[in-house]
Structure formats: C-alpha cells, structure tokens
C-alpha cells in the first residue's frame, strides 16, 4: 500500500511527513537532533486529544526558538543533514563517494528528497489537518507560526549529489564540518564553540618564522614530507596565535586543530583512535609545553613523537609551543650529581625537543622591530599620533611591562583607544 511514499498525493500531509521521518536511512543520525525529536512528537500527536497536540505544538516551537530557527526551519534541518556523519558523508569527505554501492547512493537521494519535504513543514497545514481542529479553532488561531525560510544551497536543486560531495570534500563531516576548533576533554574531542578568529593576515612581523610553519603545514596537507613542529621563544611573540591562525586559514583544505592539554598526554592513544579513520588532516596542538625535571609524563610525549606503539597516525602532526627550547626545566643541581651515567641523564633531558623535526624560534623584537609593529598596529587602529610621540610612549609602556614583544605592542595601541 505504501510502496511509493513520496508520490502518494492522497495521503494526509502530516502522516506523510511522519512516514518520511521514520524511513530515513543513511541520514538517520539527524533523528537524534532535538528539533527532529520534537517534530516527531508533533506529527504523532496530529490525531491525539487536544491537550496532547497543543503540548507537542508548543514544545516544537520552543525547541525552534532555542535554536533560533523559528524563521528558518528549512535551513536548520538541511544544515543538520550536511553536518551528519554517516557512510556517505565520510566517503564524500575522502573523495570516494563514487565508490559507494548503488543502493547506498539511491538511499542518499531518497533521504535528501525526504529531508527537503520535512524542511518545508508548514505550520498552517499541520493545524488544518489536526483531527479536532474545530474544537480548538479559537486557540489555534492564536498559536505562533514558524517560517521555513530557505534550504541550504546544496539542497536548492533537490538532491544534487555532486554538490553534496563537494561540500563534504571541502568541509569534512560530522562535528568537523560544523566546528573549526576542538579540544580533548573528558576522553573525547569537544568543539570549541567560540574559537579565536585570528587570521594570518592580522600578524605583523615574524614573517620568516611563520612562513616556515605554513610551508610545513601545506606539505602535510598535500601529502609531502613534513615534520612535527616546536614553536619556541619569548612570551607574547605569537606562537600559539600562529597555530590558531593556520587552523582558520586552512580549514577549507581539510585541516582541523585539536588542542590536547599536556596533563592528558597519556590519553593520546584514545585520541589516535578517534581521528585515524577520518578523511581529514589534524594538527594536535599542545600549548605552553614544559616539564619539571622529575615530571615523567614527558615520556608519553616522547613515545608519541617517535617509537611508541600508539604513534601518531599519518593524518596528524603535533605542533607544540613553549617558552623554552629544551622542554625540561633543568637546574645546575641536576648536573651536580654522583650518578655515573650523568651524561646519559642529560641526553635524556635534551632528547625530547630533538624529536620535533622542525623547531622555529620566536624571539623578542629589538627596538626597531618593536616600533615597526607599533606603527603598523597604530595605523590599523586609526591612531594619528606623530611617530616620535608614539615611539616614546611605546618605549615607556614596554618598560613598565618588562620588555618589548608583539603582545606588548598590541596592548599599548589598544590602551590609546581607551
């Protein structure tokens, strides 16, 4: 009876929508989204008693409100489909969608047609089809209506298979399509909802250092020879910001950045298991890395960098920042020891930093370089002060902050706008 669900013109609108929702296959993951859950409850209540129907209607509108989707239901639902992680989106992100079996491709097309229908769920039609609408007409006329708006561009022409594949190829799938930055927390990869939006164009100075890191990253993306990277040097010179900017700049080329706290390095094998099968490139970012002389957790990082059973996968590089070239803090007392293998102990201390194939030094600028950064930042900010006065004030500001750095220059220029 229901062999051609989409084509049945005599079927009630709400019943057809409910059936299409229930029969999603490849994109079934979107059914776990709160909007789809509340939509299911509303459609199921279309022949229930008024209190149940009105409660489901109110809940659906509330969920839409929470997601800022009362004016854009279609956009919200089709975005959920684009961000879904399934056999199709994984294959498309890897550029292998054409290798999928034909029945999977047909299921994708059918799901997309169903999703477009559901994305255009009309409030007025739902109300008019409600079994007991005449009993609640007075209340129904006062209920808020939602608007569908537009579907995402990939769904504008129905199921455009090639366009969907292109989206996944450029943006990835699942959480990696929706978010740009991530952190390892509680044994899983969590998205950073409000990431730093810094770009490579926003930097002034350190072009040579930043280019070396960029070249290494591009080689990694393009499958060429590349290295784990240590960005070391003075505070406030843009080491961490460089890594963040790379993640923003190269997102469209399949690069993602996952920050891993140093104290969680023992969990690296768990992170490897998460990212190794994914068709994306990952920078595992360890910020402000250093170890005390008795901190043996550095052995976890050594194993990751070289020689461990759970070594990094081929789709990942490790980028670390540190204020120290040699990552283990060492005192003269550490060298003044009666250990007969003192030289071996020193080599053990120094070996960690040597396992980064690329080490890039970000040192504090001299006076001329510092002032060039100040002048450029001041021009960007629209500061009209004469250079002589600007230089004198910048030097006094740097002296009060304990030295020159790009961060100090930025803070100084921002202070002028206060």
Image (cartoon, rainbow, N blue to C red):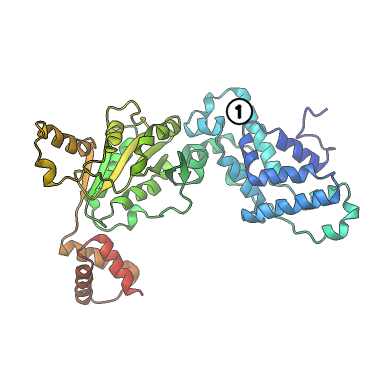
Q: Secondary structure at mark 1?
A: helix
Res 386 quadrant in image: bottom left
Residue receiving disc 1? 105
123 vs 218, left or right, is right
Q: Give the residue drawn at x 64%, y 46%.
A: 34
180 vs 211, left or right, is right
Q: Is residue 320 in sight in this rendering?
A: yes
Q: Give the residue drawn at x 29%, y 76%.
A: 384
Q: Could you say which is closer to the camera, residue 122 or residue 65?
A: 65
133 vs 301, left or right, is right
Residue 371 percent coordinates (x, y): 20, 66
Residue 191 percent coordinates (x, y): 47, 46
Instruction: Check the image and name the residue furthest to the right.
Output: 134
Residue 64 percent coordinates (x, y): 66, 53
For the C terminus, which image quadrant? bottom left
Q: Give the residue drawn at x 45%, y 47%.
A: 180
For the N terminus, which image quadrant? top right
User: Compared with residue 247, is residue 11 higher up or lower down, i.e. above or below?
Assistant: above
Q: Give the residue drawn at x 31%, y 42%.
A: 319
Res 136 quadrant in image: bottom right
188 vs 222, left or right, is right
Q: Is residue 214 in sight in this rendering?
A: no
User: Compared with residue 386, is residue 209 higher up or lower down, i.e. above or below?
Assistant: above
Instruction: Check the image and name the residue furthest to the front.
Output: 338
Residue 55 percent coordinates (x, y): 77, 52
Res 333 quadrant in image: top left
Instruction: Report how many numbered discs are placed on residues in the image.
Output: 1
For disc 1, the neighbor class at 10 Å (few under 14, some 14 to 19, many from 20) is: some
């Amino acid at each position: 009876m229901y062999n051609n669900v989409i084509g049945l013109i005599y079927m009630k609108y709400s019943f057809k929508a409910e059936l299409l929702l229930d029969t999603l296959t490849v994109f079934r993951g979107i059914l776990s989204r709160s909007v789809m859950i509340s939509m299911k409850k509303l459609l199921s209540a279309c022949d229930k008693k008024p209190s149940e129907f009105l409660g489901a209607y109110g809940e659906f509108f509330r969920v839409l409100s929470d997601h800022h989707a009362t004016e854009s239901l279609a956009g919200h639902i089709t975005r959920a489909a684009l961000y879904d992680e399934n056999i199709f989106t994984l294959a498309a992100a890897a550029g292998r969608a054409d290798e999928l079996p034909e029945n999977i491709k047909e299921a994708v097309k059918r799901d997309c047609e169903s999703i477009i229908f559901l994305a255009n769920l009309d409030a007025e039609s739902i109300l008019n089809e409600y079994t007991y609408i005449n009993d609640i007409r007075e209340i129904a006329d006062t209920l808020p209506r939602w608007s569908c708006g537009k579907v995402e561009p990939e769904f504008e022409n129905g199921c455009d298979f090639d366009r969907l594949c292109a989206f996944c190829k450029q943006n990835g799938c699942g959480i990696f399509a929706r978010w740009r930055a991530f952190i390892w927390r509680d044994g899983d990869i969590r998205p950073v909802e409000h990431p730093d939006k810094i770009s490579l164009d926003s930097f002034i100075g350190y072009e040579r250092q930043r280019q070396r890191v960029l070249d290494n990253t591009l080689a990694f993306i393009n499958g060429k020879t590349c290295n784990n990277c240590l960005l070391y040097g003075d505070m406030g010179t843009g080491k961490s910001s460089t890594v963040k900017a790379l993640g923003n700049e190269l997102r469209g080329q399949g690069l993602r950045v996952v920050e891993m706290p140093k104290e969680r390095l023992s969990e690296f094998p768990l992170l490897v298991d998460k990212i190794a099968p994914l068709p994306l490139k990952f920078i595992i970012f360890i910020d402000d890395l250093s170890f005390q002389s008795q901190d043996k957790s550095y052995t976890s990082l050594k194993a990751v960098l070289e020689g461990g059973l759970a070594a990094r996968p081929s789709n990942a590089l490790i980028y670390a920042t540190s204020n120290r070239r040699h990552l283990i803090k060492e005192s003269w007392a550490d060298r003044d020891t009666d250990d007969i293998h003192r030289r071996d102990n020193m080599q053990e201390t120094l070996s960690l930093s040597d396992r980064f194939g690329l080490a890039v030094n970000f040192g504090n600028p001299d006076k001329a370089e510092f002032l060039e950064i100040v002048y450029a930042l001041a021009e960007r900010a629209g500061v009209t002060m004469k250079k002589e006065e600007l230089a004198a004030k910048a030097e006094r500001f740097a002296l009060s902050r304990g030295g020159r750095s790009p961060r100090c220059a930025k803070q100084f220029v921002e202070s002028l706008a206060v």
